[in-house]
Image (tube, rainbow, N blue to C red):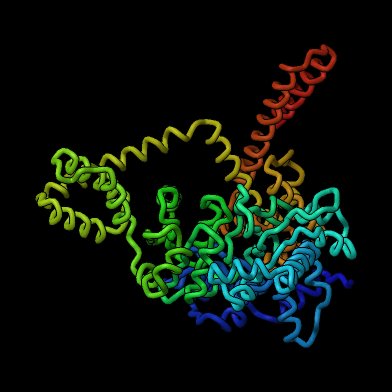
């Protein structure tokens, strides 16, 4: 397979000025040296994205997406970086072969998972699948839905592993969670629902029992090199470009909730994989929308999950709507009450404060004056967290009417809590900032700053940093540090837009790099500042190394070895004195 060298990629990049590429999608206006437009990667009203013709890069100052023409096209078209290069190469009349291979280290894994999925689908469509089809029909899952969600069947025939062994190694099948090490299948007698990553690659399965009353209703693929359930949401790859008119995404609990919703035309639903919602899930969703609707199960567990999700969402700048159902889950709600009732629900979600008002009411007797007083107090405390001042006024008005309490009294109480809340959060913040954390923050900042100036002023900084930095403790940043030095020595300069292409396949380094180029530090710097950063990086290394050695010293009993460790500590301190 041909290997595409960086020079070819850079040549393709130079033939396509960034402004022309961005203008295919976004209207740009010139302001100062740069062009500005509405960022297509987040809901944007103030033209937050700048395009620099000097650096051949785009950058959004709100959502912090940044990159060269290939990143831009890849994100706009929802294709890989390599495919974006190919797209432009084809426009130029070339086809760059080998790129997809180079860009996709898991291509073979996806191939295996896709083949396993097809195998399961064939089972369902064969005579072996009669009972499973009957089960699905009873659940009102029709043939079109089965096809759309690529639903299949694992039988007890132990047939998948031998089938895949014709072409692949057992080790890969074990690693991907399909087979046991005695060459038997992991999944037996289950309806199989394929799970995809954010880009739509098949990475795992959810297997549901359908004919016995097994204790575990669902078995999911274990964590593998491609399947990390904390980082994926079921159905995201279909839902992310099917947002409805108010641009929202709906989070449900289960596969069949999401599948059922699609049968009534609601296609913007996702589900975390049998885990509760995580910060990571929210970060994923925030990239495509500011409007998140929680539609969990109707029972107490679903209510508690909603409360937990709201806690996670509290500090995020997103609009949250909540749906509470009078049935077990969305699946059952739609079956029992129909499409129109469900649409009415999702078009009129509760606000956070409405949901909390209902929740706080649950265990109270609101004919009792004392309990009413407690209830009002609790709601006003919750209301302090509400960012929308209109919502605050509206809720206070509602309370005034409902409980016949003077508006002024409610408002005074609100203002009092608002004030003390500010003080609370301030003192909390101060408490967390202990010295160790401060040191880490200072070190992290110094490392970032150093990497930033190495990137933008390579001629002045790279050799100097290479000579004076002892060791960067953070492994990703250390890799970036080494890559910058390597790249600079190879090409004699650093053109950021080209460096992006070079780093693009090195995923973890690229994340750090993205963070660095998004920092927007001032252009001018002094040698003293650079020396400060280097000193801070080195101090942090010395402290960590010394701490580690001291620990070793404490557990070491051999006097010879003790002496050796002591020497080492002395040496590190010695380096300290030579600064
Ligand atoms: Zn943006």
Q: Nearer the viewer, residue 171 or 351?
A: 171
**Image point (45%, 59%), residue name:** 329
Picture quadrant where residue 321 is located = bottom left
- Judge whether residue 458 can be spotted in this image: no
**Image point (77%, 18%), residue name:** 566
* Residue 43 placement (x, y as % from top left): 45, 70
- Looking at the image, is 185 positioned above or below residue 243? above
**Image point (75%, 86%), residue name:** 92
* Residue 519 placement (x, y as % from top left): 56, 56
* Residue 83 placement (x, y as % from top left): 72, 75
Picture quadrant where residue 456 is located = bottom right
Could you tell whether 214 is left or right of 469 in the image? left
- Judge whether residue 124 can be spotted in this image: yes
Could you tell whether 10 is left or right of 47 in the image? right
* Residue 356 placement (x, y as % from top left): 31, 51
**Image point (10%, 52%), residue name:** 404
- Looking at the image, is 251 positioned above or below residue 465? below
- Looking at the image, is 45 positioned above or below residue 226? below
- Looking at the image, is 269 positioned above or below residue 406? below
Q: Which quadrant would the C terminus be assigned to in this image?
A: top right
């Amino acid at each position: 397979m041909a290997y595409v060298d960086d020079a070819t990629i850079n040549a393709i990049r130079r033939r396509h000025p960034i402004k022309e590429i961005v203008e295919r999608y976004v209207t740009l206006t010139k302001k100062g040296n740069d062009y500005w437009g509405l960022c297509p990667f987040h809901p944007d009203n103030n033209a937050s994205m700048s395009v620099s013709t000097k650096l051949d890069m785009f950058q959004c100052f709100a959502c912090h997406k940044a990159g060269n023409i290939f990143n831009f096209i890849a994100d706009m078209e929802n294709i890989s970086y390599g495919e974006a290069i190919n797209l432009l190469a084809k426009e130029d009349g070339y086809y760059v072969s080998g790129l997809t291979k180079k860009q996709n280290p898991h291509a073979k894994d996806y191939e295996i998972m896709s083949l396993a999925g097809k195998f399961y689908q064939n089972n369902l469509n064969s005579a072996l699948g009669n009972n499973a089809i009957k089960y699905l029909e009873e659940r009102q899952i029709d043939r079109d839905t089965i096809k759309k969600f690529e639903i299949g069947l694992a039988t007890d025939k132990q047939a998948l592993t031998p089938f895949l062994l014709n072409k692949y190694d057992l080790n890969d099948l074990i690693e991907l969670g399909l087979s046991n090490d005695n060459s038997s299948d992991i999944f037996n007698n289950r309806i199989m629902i394929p799970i995809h990553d954010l880009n739509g690659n098949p990475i795992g399965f959810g297997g549901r029992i359908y004919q016995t009353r097994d204790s575990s209703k669902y078995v999911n693929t274990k964590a593998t090199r491609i399947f990390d359930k904390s980082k994926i949401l079921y159905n995201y790859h279909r839902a992310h470009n099917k947002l409805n008119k108010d641009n929202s995404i709906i989070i449900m609990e289960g596969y069949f909730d999401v599948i059922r919703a699609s049968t009534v035309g609601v296609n913007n639903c996702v589900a975390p994989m049998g885990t509760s919602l995580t910060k990571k899930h929210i970060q994923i969703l925030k990239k495509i929308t500011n409007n998140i609707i929680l539609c969990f199960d109707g029972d107490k567990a679903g209510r508690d999950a909603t409360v937990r999700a709201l806690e996670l969402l509290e500090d995020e700048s997103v609009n949250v709507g909540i749906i509470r159902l009078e049935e077990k889950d969305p699946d059952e709600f739609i079956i029992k009450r129909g499409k129109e009732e469900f649409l009415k629900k999702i078009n009129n979600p509760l606000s956070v404060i409405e949901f909390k008002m209902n929740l706080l009411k649950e265990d109270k007797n609101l004919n009792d004056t004392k309990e009413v007083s407690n209830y009002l107090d609790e709601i006003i405390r919750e209301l302090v967290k509400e960012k929308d001042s209109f919502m605050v006024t509206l809720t206070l008005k509602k309370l005034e009417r409902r409980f016949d309490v003077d508006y002024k009294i409610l408002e005074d109480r609100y203002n009092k809590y608002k004030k003390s809340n500010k003080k609370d959060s301030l003192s909390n913040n101060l408490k967390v900032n202990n010295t160790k954390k401060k040191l880490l923050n200072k070190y992290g900042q110094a490392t970032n700053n150093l990497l930033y100036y190495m990137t933008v002023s390579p001629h002045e900084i790279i050799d100097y940093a290479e000579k004076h930095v002892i060791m960067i403790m953070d492994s990703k940043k250390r890799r970036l540090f080494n890559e910058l030095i390597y790249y600079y020595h190879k090409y004699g300069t650093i053109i950021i837009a080209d460096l992006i292409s070079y780093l693009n396949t090195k995923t973890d380094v690229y994340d750090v790099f993205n963070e660095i180029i998004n920092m927007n530090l001032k252009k001018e710097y002094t040698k003293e500042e650079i020396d400060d950063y280097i000193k801070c990086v080195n101090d942090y290394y010395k402290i960590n190394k010394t701490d580690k050695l001291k620990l070793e010293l404490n557990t070491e009993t051999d006097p010879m070895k003790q002496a050796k460790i002591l020497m080492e500590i002395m040496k590190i301190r010695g380096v300290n004195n030579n600064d």
